[in-house]
Amino acid sequence: MSNFNKYIMKKLTKRSLLLSGLMLSMMTFANGNIENSKERESKVTNISFDNVKRGSMLSIKDIKGIVLYNESIAKAGDYSKGFDLTALPNGDYFFELDAEFDIVIIPFNVVSNQVVFKKDEKLKIFKPNIRIKDNMVFVSRFSFEKSPIECNIYFADNNDLVRSERFNEETYSTKVYDFSNAPKGEYIFVFESEGRKFIKSINNI
């Protein structure tokens, strides 16, 4: 894992600034793959994703995690939009597509109004998945980087911590929780890994 990837997975801030002057593009990026346009002097970059679900969040962030642009995908299907990134100050940035099951991160660098995507440092983070069958809750988690993850379960009515657990540093890990004797109500699962937090809830009725 590169130093850049380790850095961007640190805890991100919630401050946001709008990035102005975002326009059409002539460089393509589909499903995290980038093709340089033949028009090298073009100031525009086209970002495209296939099969994006409605409600996914697309952001542009700097190396400190400050949000420069943020958009909720309004329509499911293929997504394409152009951005003028040349006006950004010199530095490291990244596109982030936050979907239901994963997060795709594509880093790029701006130097003297030139935009260079770091294809080799593309990163996909899989979110923990929760599946319920009868009174059993199955939690699974996949990680290319085999990074550890903490899981805290809270009872929503009073925010009491019900259980705290650490997932092993494995590519794929699963946990099974028996809620058959647990009080009825909503339970909140809070997962934390590499400075990122994922929150999911279930109802034990």
Image: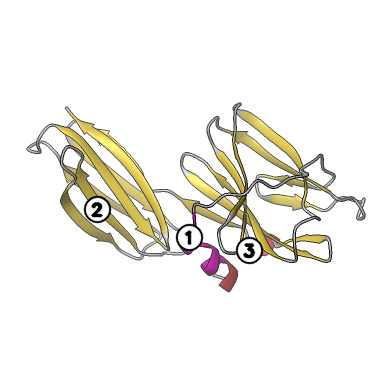
- Please state, as top left, top right, bottom left or bottom right, where the N terminus lies in the image: bottom right
Residue that numbered label 2 is attached to: 152
Q: Nearer the viewer, mark 2 or mark 1?
A: 2
The CA distance from mark 3 to mark 1 is 13 Å
- At a point 82% along the width and 43% down the height, the residue shown is 25
Q: Amino acid at mark 3?
A: Glu
Residue 121's mark? Answer: 3
- At a point 75% along the width and 62% down the height, the residue shown is 89
Relative height, residue 54 to residue 10 (above, below): above
Q: Work out whether mark 3 precedes mark 1 in sequence or the reverse, and give the earlier one.
A: 3
- At a point 76% along the width and 43% down the height, the residue shown is 22
Q: Amino acid at mark 1?
A: Phe
- At a point 29% along the width and 38% down the height, the residue shown is 201
- Asked if residue 110 lies in the magenta stretch, the reply is no
Few, some or many residues within 10 Å of mark 1 (<14, 14–19, 20+): few
Indicate the quadrant where residue 159 lies.
top left
First to last magenta residue range: 5-13
Q: Amino acid at mark 2?
A: Asn
Relative height, residue 99 to residue 143 (above, below): above
The CA distance from mark 3 to mark 2 is 30 Å
Q: Nearer the viewer, mark 3 or mark 2?
A: 2
Measured as percent of width and height from the top left, residue 187 is found at 22, 39
In this view, the residue farthest toward the left is: 181
The colour scheme applied to this rendered structure is secondary structure
Q: Left or right: where does residue 182 sit relative to residue 100?
A: left
Residue that numbered label 1 is attached to: 144
